[in-house]
Structures are given as C-alpha cells and as structure tokens.
Amino acid sequence: MRRASHLALFLAALLSPGCLVLSLQPAYDNDSIVSDDALVGGWSNADDQTEATIERGEWRSYRIVYKDRFATRTFQGNLTKIGAAVFLDLTELRGVDPGPYLVPVHGVFRVEIAGNTLTATPFDYNWFSRALAQKTIARLTAALDDRRNAIVASPTAEFRRWLAQPPDEAFAAPMTFKRTR
C-alpha cells in the first residue's frame, strides 16, 4: 500500500504543471550576500540540453539567462553562504512590474564550483510534498499552492536557520554544467 501511495504521489507530481519548491522570502539578507567571479561565464549541461549565461548584475547580483529546449528565461541571482554551503537564490529579472497581484518567488539552489564544473542542486519536490503531507517539515512554514508547487513562507532568518542543517533528502539530484566560456 505504501509503495502504491508513493507511486501515485510521483505520478501526480510528474503530470502536474507545478512541481517546484519555491520560497516567498529570499535565502539571503543584506549581510550574507557573497560573490564569486568563478560563477561568471557560459555554462552547458549536455545531458539536459540546457545552457546558462551568467553575468554580473546590479547591486551584488548576477544576471542569468537560462535556455532549455523549450524556452529562454532571465533571472536575477544572489549568492549567499550559510555555513560551508553556498546557495544561489533566483528570481525573475527585477525591473519588470507584473502588477500588484503577482508575488515574486525565489528558487534556491545549492551550488558548487570546481574548476570548469558548476553543480546546481535544487530542492527535491517529492521530499517536500511528502514532508508537507506528513507534517514533518521541521521549523519551516510551507504549503502546496493551487499548481502543486511547494511554497516556503518562513521569514528569511528562519529559512536560513533551516538551510544551515537541511536533511540530505531535501535535495534532488544535482545538475552539472561545464564551462563553455
């Protein structure tokens, strides 16, 4: 029975138009933003057929153009360090006002740069959705929205405390990019 419920949850996540883990608040605060020149450049993931071009942005940020087989998206990114881990917090590019009824959200990735390899590890949607259903998501306020995205609503300080010691299972498989320029 347990296996069937896991399969049903997986299929629901796979077929849903949402299935992201997002935060209403950033993973960084003004004092925790860091920069790393090694992040700037062109990156490619041959397995997923994706590309990312990362440039310096305004006020200690990065401008990231991400292309996959279907679309091109532009983000603003901020790096923040929590303990030994570095996280990249992405939002849709600032300066675009979508109106008062749309709330900007943050996608958070654990990142590592080693030579010409960039590893970006997203949150695991299945872990978050199970933790929400079982009410075992410690110290975070979170819920599923109407598109089935997992939305963290905790304040930045509480989100950062959680990110200091997240369960290993809270992260999905990493995406690996190779430097192209």
Image (tube, rainbow, N blue to C red):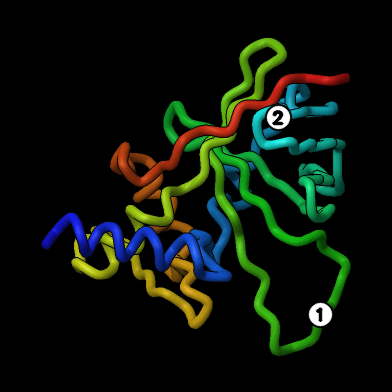
Q: Residue 98's mark?
A: 1
Identify the image quadrant of the C terminus.
top right
Q: Nearer the viewer, residue 46 or 165?
A: 46
Horizontal arrangement in the rendering, residue 133 relative to residue 26 (left or right):
left
**In the depicted structure, whether residue 31 falls above or below residue 25:** above
Camera-side residue: 57 or 4? Answer: 4
Residue 45 numbered tag = 2
Tell me the crowding category of disc 1: few under 14, some 14 to 19, or many 20 or more residues within 10 angstroms, Cα based: few
Q: Mark 1 or mark 2: which is in front?
A: 2
Residue 162 position in % (x across, y down): 35, 50
**Three-letter code for the amino acid on which mark 2 is drawn:** Asn
Q: CA distance from mark 1 to mark 2?
A: 30 Å
Residue furthest top in the image:
115
Closer to the chain start, of discs 1 and 2, is: 2
Q: Looking at the image, which residue is at 62% across and 66% down?
A: 105
The residue depicted at 41 percent of the width and 74 percent of the height is 144
Q: In the rendered view, does 82 fall on the left or right side of 51?
A: left
Position of residue 127 measured from the top left corner of the image (x, y, whole percent)? 33, 53
Amino acid carrying label 1: it is: Pro
**Secondary structure beneath disc 2?**
strand
**Circle 2 crowding by C-alpha within 10 Å: few under 14, some 14–19, many from 20:** some
Q: Is residue 56 above or below residue 72?
A: above
Residue 178 lies in quadrant: top right
User: Is 16 on the left-hand or right-hand side of 135?
Assistant: right
